[in-house]
Image: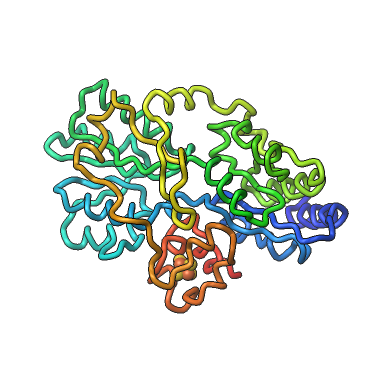
Amino acid sequence: MQQTEMIKKAKEIIDVFNPGVQFNIMEVCGSHTMAISKFGLRQILPKNIRLISGPGCPVCVTAQNEIDSIIELSNKNVVIATFGDLIRVPGSKSSLQQQRAAGKEIKVFYSPLDALKYAEENPTKEVVFLGIGFETTIPTVAVTIKEAKKKNIKNYSVYCLHKTMPEALRVLLEEGSKVQGFLLPGHVSAITGSKIYEFIPKEFGVGGVISGFEAMDILMSIIMLLKNYKNSSIEIQYKRVVREEGNVKAQKIIEEIFEPCDSTWRGLGKIKGSGLKMKDKYKDFDAAVKFDIKPIGEEFEIKGCRCGDVLKGSIYPNECPLFGNVCTPENPVGPCMVSSEGSCAAFYKYGA
Ligand code: SF4
């Protein structure tokens, strides 16, 4: 069957299971947001079934005071090693892109392993990898720390701003978010497994489906949510990648290197146990300790930017007054317009 035929068929099934009441589905993951916009899935759903974005874009949820501390770190005669998306995120006074233009060493790597290799090949330079991201990214960062210790690479460290997903979903639900179902992140869940979400139906009576990223994956997941919404549970649609128990080997290496700590999220504030810090055994590789760096002051919003509300699913990006006029991908005001997984960028690229 052609994709358009399959989408038509899925639409018919969605109509059959339409509960007939307002049904908000939060797509937690930034990659889902992009896929939904790219395939135009919002437009084919009945009006009462709404897809709203959640806090699943790692760059977007990095708090503004964390971004400012990264800029400060780049002034400390180090090489900042980072994924590309972060370069253009505006800090209060500068961005990494502007820091680079001012002569600071900011290098983009596709993998933390490449950053470690760069450190090994350049022993006179202090290389700091920016640990931003969820459970998907964390195991590879953990591997670099383990390797650096094993090989005694003393000029490599990680500024750990990693966040973990379940605690943020709990806060959203406790704050009374009007979500009737979650499209849960496929890549994160490949590492964590599905059990970490069990509190969602048990404590809040809301269901969730771990979804893949193709149009049909997402539509199938929506159908599963609608079919099961009176008897909420956590289901796996993305079975070709996600197992109930997750990737146990990856979980073990995370546990070996990191321990939970509180973390501040853009839009959601400080969330207990939602971040990771390095265990004492690895503190020589902790850039926060090595360079005495920490988020600067209290979390705050960039003036006029409503990324916090977008990340909580309270508004659609085009409801931000700056969307598309003051704030564009060429001149982003907030991270949701910068990141390749940001909701504002998705709405701008593919239309609202
Ligand atoms: Fe922030 Fe720009 Fe999105 Fe508005 S459109 S919420 S200013 S990133």
Which residue sits at x=59%, y=31%? 193
**Quadrant in which residue 263 is drawn:** top left
User: Extreme left residue here?
Assistant: 124
Residue drawn at x 19%, y 42% as measured from the top left? 291
> Is 50 drawn above or below residue 135 in the view shown?
below
Colouring of the image: rainbow
Q: Nearer the viewer, residue 196 or 328?
A: 196
Please state which of residues 167 and 339 is positioned toward the viewer in this rendering.
Answer: 167
Q: Residue at x 70, y 61 (%)?
A: 50
Residue 134 percent location from the top left of the image: 47, 41
Quarter of the figure with residue 275: top left
User: What percent of the width, then of the height, locates residue 205?
Assistant: 73, 43
**In this view, 303 is above or below 255:** below
- Up the image or down, 336 lies above or below 327; here it is above
Q: Which quadrant would the C terminus be assigned to in this image?
A: bottom right
Residue at the limit of the structure toward the right, as seen here: 16
Q: Name the side, left or right, on which 94 lies relative to 186.
A: left
Residue 278 left/right relative to 191: left
Q: Is residue 188 above or below residue 181?
A: above
**Would residue 190 appear left or right of 84 to someone viewing this image?**
right
